């Protein structure tokens, strides 16, 4: 059985439950870590909530597992809620993003096995191909360090910019070595990027937000991250020590089942790819 909860905006958390526009919390409710309690998992709406919802509705009951799906619409609050004990796990992020968050916020989390990849894409409402981007074009990328670096690398991979060698450090807009088209690269909160398309020449948008906005990455993107060898697979994250929770182990088994692989393949048709 599944319960699905939307994340609460902070200003309304004490008043009502609704879908957050820019993130939120779980209203302060603590997860119950007992073996028979429902497993509270924080997710992004698409595709994470869809995939976890499939597991909860179609597979969990036979495995004796109950899942509460808690949706968030930003990339900050799911880790805050996990750290504060309001979730048992979250499923929305990549290892590079997790590592950056652990380094800056001091979280003691553990990443489990990769589940899926959402290729990052460059999208435009004004131009139909990369070579149509004019000199001085405005290009929006995410403003968090991990996704900003992914966006810059996508631009570099498609010949739009050249980045300086930053070693193991994530590149930033300060690391542009060559910008032959004089692109104006601006950073915007990742969830807001689809809304900027009417105001910029192009935007590098995370796969989940692109899908949620009605974009089809395989058809609509001017450029798309390669899936093969992509280090940015999405996975379940738990607090250190909770990886041995039998409910977490059961969830991991179900998320990496043939049924979930088939669900991803048939539902997203290449916009989301199994990573197992």
Image (cartoon, grey):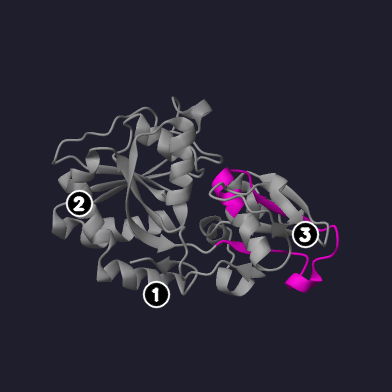
Which callout, 3 or 2, points at the residue further toward the start of the chain? 3
- Front residue of 14/127: it is 127
Q: Which mark is residue 21?
A: none
Q: Residue at x 59, y 65 (%)?
A: 215
- First in residue order: circle 1 vs circle 3: 3
Residue 268: x and y, percent?
45, 70
Magenta segment includes 197: no
Q: Dot 3, crowdedness within 10 Å: few (<14), some or many (≥20)?
A: many
Res 162 quadrant in image: bottom right
Task: Please state which of the two labelled residues, at mark 1 or mark 3, is closer to the viewer.
Answer: 3
Apparent side of residue 195 relative to residue 199 in the rendered image (left or right) = left
Q: Circle 2 is placed at which residue position?
A: 249
- Whether tag 3 and tag 2 are in contact, CB under 8 A, the answer is no
- Give, as a single range, the part of the protein colored magenta: 120-149
Indicate which disc residue 266 carries.
1
The residue positioned 14% from the left and 40% from the top of the image is: 35
Task: Check disc 2 and report its element: helix, strand or loop.
Answer: helix
Q: Residues within 10 Å of mark 1 (few under 14, many from 20)?
A: few
Which residue is the site of mark 3?
A: 201
């Amino acid at each position: 059985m599944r319960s699905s909860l939307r994340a609460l905006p902070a200003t309304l958390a004490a008043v009502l439950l609704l879908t957050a526009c820019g993130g939120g919390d779980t209203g302060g409710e603590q997860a119950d870590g007992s073996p028979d309690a429902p497993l509270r998992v924080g997710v992004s709406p698409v595709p994470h909530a869809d995939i976890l919802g499939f597991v909860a509705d179609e597979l969990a009951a036979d495995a004796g597992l109950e899942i509460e799906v808690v949706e968030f619409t930003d990339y900050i609050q799911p880790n805050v809620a996990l750290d504060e004990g309001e979730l048992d796990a979250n499923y929305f992020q990549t290892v590079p993003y997790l590592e950056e968050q652990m380094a800056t916020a001091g979280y003691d989390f553990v990443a489990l096995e990769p589940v899926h990849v959402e290729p990052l894409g460059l999208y435009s409402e004004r131009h139909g191909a990369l070579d149509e981007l004019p000199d001085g074009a405005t290009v929006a990328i995410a403003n968090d360090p991990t996704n900003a670096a992914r966006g810059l690398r996508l631009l570099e991979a498609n010949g739009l910019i050249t980045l300086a060698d930053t070693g193991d450090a994530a590149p930033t807009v300060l690391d542009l070595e060559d910008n032959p088209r004089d692109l104006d690269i601006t950073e915007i909160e990742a969830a807001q990027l689809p809304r900027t398309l009417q105001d910029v020449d192009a935007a590098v948008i995370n796969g989940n937000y692109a899908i949620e906005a009605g974009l089809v990455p395989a058809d609509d993107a001017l450029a798309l991250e390669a899936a093969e060898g992509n280090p940015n697979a999405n996975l379940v994250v738990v607090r250190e020590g909770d990886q041995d929770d039998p409910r977490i182990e059961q969830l991991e088994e179900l998320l990496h089942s043939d049924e979930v692989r088939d669900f991803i393949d048939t539902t997203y048709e290449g916009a989301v790819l199994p990573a197992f």
